[in-house]
């Protein structure tokens, strides 16, 4: 056995908030339900919701670090999202409806020298993850602790914006890179890591304050790479919950 699920996270609007869940039911070939359902296209973006496009088309933490301090709550039956930010307070809206109120609400924390947020988009049956395939991100707490020990202080796991966090006595730092193209059973689901998650300046930002305060990229360089976590394809769907076992099969 590799370990157990210690936490599960989804990000209803790409780069705009995180939300803890106690369980999720994965679907083969899909992203995690409720994760990156919407993305905020900026004024120079070509994204129109017809198909997946790369992260450069969207407003995101690497360009607007104060977005990192946002949390989210998705009310799936009502189709509403509530966003909370320490500078902006709370805002509840329907991302499939008129987005003008949301754009007005978030504007004060968007850098003036960057392309401004223009519209919300959603691709049918496809979360807007950074990978060009529908992926679920699996993170290793041992790797996170290795980064903390190297940088010299505790850091929030939210810098990595992962979906599934694993921990256990059998897990060593960077074990996840050895899982590539191997099947992993987590709870009732089977996933197959397909690529390492390359990291950018977003991870230098404190998830509580929205301020850049840690040179995470230089720390990763000391391990010989700039990767953290793996992006996995869901091979067989199934339920995953806090405490679910994870094992290579």
Image (spheres, rainbow, N blue to C red):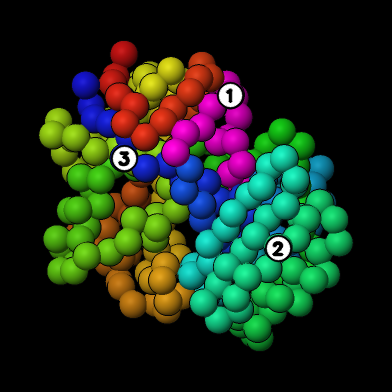
Per the rendered image, the range of residues in magenta is: 22-36
Say the numbered circle drawn on residue 27.
Answer: 1
Q: Earlier in the sequence, mark 2 or mark 3?
A: 3
Which image quarter holds the N terminus?
top left
Q: Is residue 81 magenta?
A: no
Most foreground residue, 102 or 118: 102
Say the numbered circle drawn on residue 92.
Answer: 2
Residue 143 in picture, x, y percent from top left: 23, 47
Left or right of 219? Residue 59 is right
Q: Quadrant of residue 39?
A: bottom right
Residue 212 in picture, x, y percent from top left: 39, 77
Say the numbered circle drawn on residue 6.
Answer: 3
Mark pair 2, 3: CA separation: 29 Å
Q: Secondary structure at mark 3?
A: strand
Q: Residues within 10 Å of mark 2 (few under 14, many from 20)?
A: some
Q: Quadrant of residue 84?
A: bottom right
Left or right of 129? Residue 247 is left
Which image quarter holds the C terminus?
top left
Mark pair 1, 3: CA separation: 20 Å
Q: Secondary structure at mark 1?
A: loop
Residue 57 in picture, x, y percent from top left: 68, 59
Q: Earlier in the sequence, mark 1 or mark 3?
A: 3
At 79% from the left edge and 47% from the top edge, which residue is drawn?
Answer: 49
At 57% from the left edge and 21% from the top edge, which residue is drawn?
Answer: 28
């Amino acid at each position: 056995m590799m370990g157990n699920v210690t936490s599960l996270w989804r990000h209803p609007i790409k780069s705009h908030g995180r939300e803890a869940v106690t369980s999720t039911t994965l679907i083969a070939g899909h992203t995690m339900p409720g994760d990156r359902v919407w993305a905020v296209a900026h004024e120079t973006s070509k994204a129109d919701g017809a198909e997946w496009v790369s992260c450069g088309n969207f407003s995101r933490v690497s360009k607007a670090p104060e977005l990192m301090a946002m949390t989210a709550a998705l009310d799936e039956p009502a189709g509403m999202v509530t966003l909370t930010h320490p500078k902006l307070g709370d805002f509840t809206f329907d991302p499939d409806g008129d987005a003008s109120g949301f754009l007005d609400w978030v504007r004060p924390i968007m850098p003036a020298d960057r392309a401004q947020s223009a519209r919300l988009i959603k691709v049918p049956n496809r979360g807007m993850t950074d990978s060009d395939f529908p992926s679920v991100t699996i993170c290793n707490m041992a790797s996170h602790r290795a980064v903390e020990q190297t940088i010299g202080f505790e850091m929030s796991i939210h810098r990595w914006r992962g979906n599934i966090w694993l921990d256990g006595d059998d897990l060593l730092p960077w074990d996840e890179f050895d899982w590539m193209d191997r099947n992993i059973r987590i709870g009732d689901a089977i996933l197959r890591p397909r690529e390492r998650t390359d990291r950018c300046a977003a991870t230098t930002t404190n998830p509580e304050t929205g301020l850049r305060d840690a040179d995470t990229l230089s720390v990763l360089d000391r391990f010989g790479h700039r990767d953290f976590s793996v992006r996995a394809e869901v091979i067989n769907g199934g339920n995953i919950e806090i405490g679910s076992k994870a094992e290579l099969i």
